[in-house]
Image: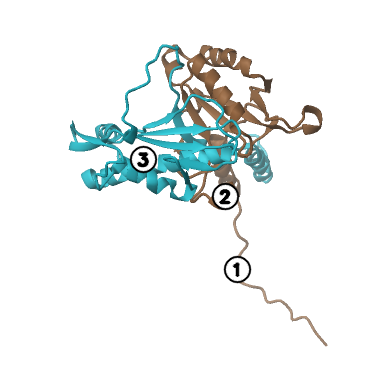
Amino acid sequence: MARRQTPEINAGSMADIAFLLLIFFLVTTTMDVDTGISRKLPPPLTGDEEPPDINERNIFTVLVNSRDRLLVEKKPGDITTLRAKAKEFLKNPQRRDDLSESTMKSIPPLGNVMVSKGVISLKNDRGTSYKMYIAVQNELTAAIDELRDELAMEKFSKKYGELINEDQIDAIQKAIPIAISEAEPEDIGDN
Amino acid sequence: MARFKREKKSGVQAINTSSLPDIIFMLLFFFMVTTVMREVTLIVKITPPEATEVEKLAKKSLVSYIYIGEPKRSAAYGSKPRIQLNDQFARIDDIPAFVASERQSRDEADRRFITTSLKVDQNIRMGIVTDVKQELRKSGAFKINYSTRKVGKINFGKLY
């Protein structure tokens, strides 16, 4: 059969076309994954709540004023030592009576563990800078994360972040909850 | 008396470039798959604060964003921090309606997993953020996420 010869398509410009598309996607792409510190807000007040009955020693107060200065446990504090202080408060390794109490609880995969009753109470002023607020939140989260890491290391010889088993993650979260409570907003002193 | 040596004909052959388009296409597909088009145009300036203990926001489709920062066009809108919802400036009172509409647009089963991401500039004051948080509490959007930049170590010296 006589076949008409089709001329070969010149593919030389294919690379150029592909380049053009590539550059378009390169420019429009945003690679950044959204990261952040997750928190859960408490439900709004109805007005008839009783103040919770928490022993004074179980509250770790952190105040941030409008000049970004800290008051930690009624003493002027510093952001660089906040993490260690919060950790010590929650763990209370020497069983001091001015730091948090803990109770023995049995949490299935972990067995009996000491669960701290400590709550971190955070209060900020309307004039506090967001940067400082996040830094404080970050340090408090870091304290909890480090405690979780330690516990996970001890029980499962893995860091908390490396755990895959849901039960194990749940157990660690129960043993060391994120006990950060934010005060109802009101203006606190200027200085 | 520099004289050009007559170039010897080398034995090296021209590199075959016929697979170049394939390589480029591979890159292209990679970017096509990973790309996320921006859905809003920012009209406020936002530099997120630094943090080390960050979590990734999973399920982008279940995240609604609230932006707070100084307007980009400060000549027209001033330098007071403003809230941006979707593509426009908003007031604090607009937040309940925003939360409701974000909820409406998701599947009923997914509604309780909606996270509100607060993208806030690091230099603004907490007052406006507190107000937004109070509104979110009232509207029942309890899961929030403070958007931050992940760094290895926070430079505390810059905080004061």
Task: Check disc 1: other Cα within 10 Å, few if <14, some if 14-19, many if 20+.
Answer: few
Tell me, by letter, which chain the rendering colours brown: B
Rendered colour, chain A: cyan
Residue at numbered disc 1: B12
Give the letter of the chain under mark 1. B
Picture quarter with the C terminus of chain A = top right
Residue lying farthest to the bottom in this orientation? B1
In the displayed structure image, the side of residue A16 where residue A83 appears, left or right = left
Q: Which mark is drawn over residue A144?
A: 3
Q: Are marks 1 and 3 on the same chain?
A: no
CB atoms of marks 2 and 1 within 8 Å:
no
Q: Is residue B13 above or below residue A184?
A: below
Type of residue at label 1?
Answer: Val
Point out the tag, 2 or 1, that comes first from the N-terminus: 1
Residue at numbered disc 2: B19
Q: Position of residue B113 (x, y in %)?
A: 43, 21
- Indicate the secondary structure of the residue bearing disc 2: loop
- Indicate the secondary structure of the residue bearing disc 3: helix
